[in-house]
Image (spheres, grey):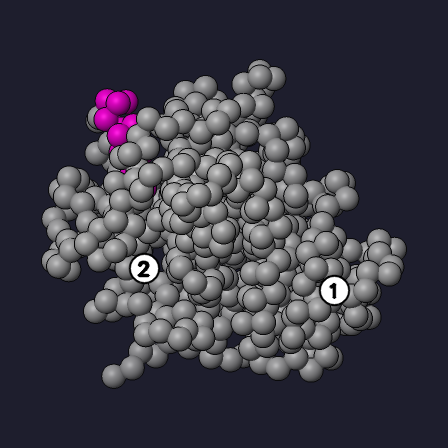
């Protein structure tokens, strides 16, 4: 017997409809590329999202056609979130920090048809447009008057003129909730970047769970500052959870330095902010040196890489702000765990509670997790046994977009590549990463890419890249090199060799010359041994 309740598809368009109807005057405030502050609200965002849908219809973009963005967090980006996905197209948020070669590769792989970009990224678009085979329309996210001339980009138009000619009346289409809604490439592992392709259903369920009190605790009484970029896993789903609850949104645009973030938090009375540790480090140093206080900020969610204990204490003890440590990944939309406390923690002393807060947290409803040993045998939740972390759930990837390999799932579980413990209360803690990627300022650097460039130098016999802890950027890459016989290759010459071959921030901070790189039984480099060899090594200028 089937239930007798109404059946509606879970569609992203319903979020902006709801926000417009019930929270039309809730504000969306953005610092723009131009530096000024722009004020909008859900009523205006909804109307302009419908204009986006109309222009895409007028251009006859098919169902599931990809519309790409190279954009900071801002109101126009939010309009595209709803207008593109709501009308049945797929929003492809591209990470502008990638090397232009990777950006061109990604745009071709996704078969993007439109690219909307902030003017900060004009140099990137100029560099790649000749290589983007499928893009038919380039749209600069600016007013007509700010549109630069003589860019050489064919058919470039301003966003305001692009949507301005179209009506704000539009009826969102109904379609299968399993249809793709957005996509995000991750370059964590070897080879080309791979894309997670989210669906309306997965995004909606993620937004519901993400808004729960024991997750990010989003409500109409909040003013949320997502510093986490909208080009990286949909800013942790905050644009959707905010529309679902009618929370005010405050977008930082390109200004993520401590001073700009502090000013925005205070002027817009932000109650809740989310970002990677690097951003909060800059904010804390600014506040400490200028002796500033928060007037309204209550909590911050910190994830993307492990949050240092000193940061949790500084927020809590010095500023009365609760830090919620969170863990997730691109393949998980991204939320997996959030470290919120249980009643029992009220009885514990501050040090013990701190040990809990340092963990990445417990699973939110909709995600299940387990840890297994090398043979795939499940390990106990005792807080000590550590093993490979696997997850499954409503918003966990089943396979990569246009993957040329089999599904990564193991008996229906997604292997995260992280190594973790889980305690009896279900709190998970990442102890290590099984991959060798380097996390720098919240971004990934593929050690293999760094090695491949070094290996292409005639003076290099072998090269291995590892991450070294860095006080500001979390980790920075260094490259250990065995010189080819007879070569007198210098540190400076090798670093100069990287120029122009990869993004600047992906260039290693240092070169260490070694006699040999340790190899394992099958001829693979043993980076754990290399790390041991370089135990006493310190990065320059730290
Ligand atoms: P990404 O797909 O770029 O979001 O990166 C996901 C990876 O970042 C995870 O698999 C973890 O290795 C790492 N990560 C994310 N959040 C945390 C955290 N709170 N603590 C430690 N590592 C984290």
Q: Nearer the viewer, residue 459 or 227?
A: 459
Instruction: Tell which circle, 2 or 1, labels the residue nearer the N-terminal end.
Output: 1
Circles 2 and 1, Cβ within 8 Å, touching? The answer is no
Label 1, secondary structure: give it.
Answer: strand
Image quarter of residue 225: top right
Residue bearing mark 1: 139
Which residue is tagged 2?
Answer: 366
Q: Position of residue 293 (x, y in %)?
A: 56, 21
Q: Nearer the viewer, residue 170 or 375?
A: 375
Q: Could you classify mark 2 by the number of other residues whose Cα lies within 10 Å: few (under 14), some (14-19), or many (20 or more)?
A: some
**Above or below 268: residue 7:** below
Q: In percent of the image, x 40 and y 75: which residue is there?
A: 404
For the magenta stretch, what is the residue range?
Answer: 349-362
Q: Please identify the quarter of the rendering in which residue 129 is found.
A: bottom right
Which mark's residue is nearer the viewer, 2 or 1? 1
Q: Is residue 66 magenta?
A: no
Q: Is mark 2 within 8 Å of ligand 1?
A: no
């Amino acid at each position: 017997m089937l239930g007798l309740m109404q059946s509606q598809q879970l569609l992203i368009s319903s979020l902006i409809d709801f926000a417009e109807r019930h929270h039309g005057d809730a504000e969306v405030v953005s610092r723009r590329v131009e530096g000024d502050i722009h004020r909008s609200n859900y009523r205006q965002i909804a109307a302009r999202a419908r204009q986006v849908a109309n222009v895409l219809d007028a251009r006859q973009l098919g169902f599931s056609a990809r519309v790409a963005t190279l954009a900071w967090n801002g109101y126009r980006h939010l309009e595209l979130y709803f207008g593109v996905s709501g009308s049945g197209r797929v929003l492809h948020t591209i990470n502008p920090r990638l090397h232009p070669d990777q950006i061109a590769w990604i745009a071709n792989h996704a078969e993007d048809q439109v690219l909307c970009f902030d003017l900060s990224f004009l140099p990137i678009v100029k560099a790649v447009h000749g290589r983007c085979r499928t893009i038919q329309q380039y749209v600069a996210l600016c007013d007509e008057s700010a549109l630069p001339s003589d860019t050489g980009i064919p058919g470039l138009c301003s966003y305001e003129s692009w949507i301005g000619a179209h009506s704000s009346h539009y009826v969102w289409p109904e379609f299968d909730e399993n249809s793709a809604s957005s996509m995000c490439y991750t370059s964590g592992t070897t080879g080309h970047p791979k894309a997670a392709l989210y669906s309306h259903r997965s995004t909606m369920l993620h937004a519901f769970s993400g808004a729960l009190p024991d997750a990010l605790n989003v409500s109409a009484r909040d003013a949320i500052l997502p510093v986490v970029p909208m080009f990286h896993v949909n800013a942790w789903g905050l644009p959707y959870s905010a529309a679902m609850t009618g929370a005010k949104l405050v977008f930082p645009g390109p200004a993520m330095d401590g001073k700009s973030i502090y000013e925005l938090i205070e002027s817009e009375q932000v109650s809740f902010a989310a970002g990677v540790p690097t951003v909060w480090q800059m904010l804390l140093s600014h506040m400490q040196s200028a002796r500033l206080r928060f007037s309204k900020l209550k909590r911050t969610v910190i994830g993307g890489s492990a949050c240092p204990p000193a940061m949790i204490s500084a927020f809590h003890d010095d500023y009365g702000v609760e830090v919620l440590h969170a863990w997730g990944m691109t393949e998980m939309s991204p939320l997996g765990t959030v470290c919120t406390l249980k009643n029992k923690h009220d009885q514990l002393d501050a040090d013990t509670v701190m040990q809990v807060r340092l963990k990445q947290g417990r699973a939110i409803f909709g995600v299940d997790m387990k840890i297994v040993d090398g043979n795939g045998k499940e390990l106990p939740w005792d807080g000590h046994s550590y093993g490979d972390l696997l997850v499954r759930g409503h918003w966990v990837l089943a396979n990569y977009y246009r993957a040329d390999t089999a599904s990564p799932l193991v008996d229906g579980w997604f292997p995260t590549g992280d190594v973790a413990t889980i305690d009896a209360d279900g709190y998970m803690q990442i102890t290590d990463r099984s991959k060798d990627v380097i996390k720098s300022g919240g971004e990934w650097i593929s050690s293999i890419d760094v090695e491949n460039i070094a290996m292409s130098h005639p003076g290099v016999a072998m090269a291995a890249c590892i991450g070294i802890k860095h006080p500001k950027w979390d980790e920075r890459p260094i490259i250990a090199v065995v010189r080819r016989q007879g070569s007198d290759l210098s540190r400076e010459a090798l670093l100069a060799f990287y120029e122009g071959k990869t993004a600047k921030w992906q260039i290693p901070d240092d070169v260490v010359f070694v006699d040999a790189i340790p190899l394992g039984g099958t001829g693979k480099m043993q980076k754990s041994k290399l790390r041991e060899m370089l135990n006493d090594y310190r990065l320059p200028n730290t």
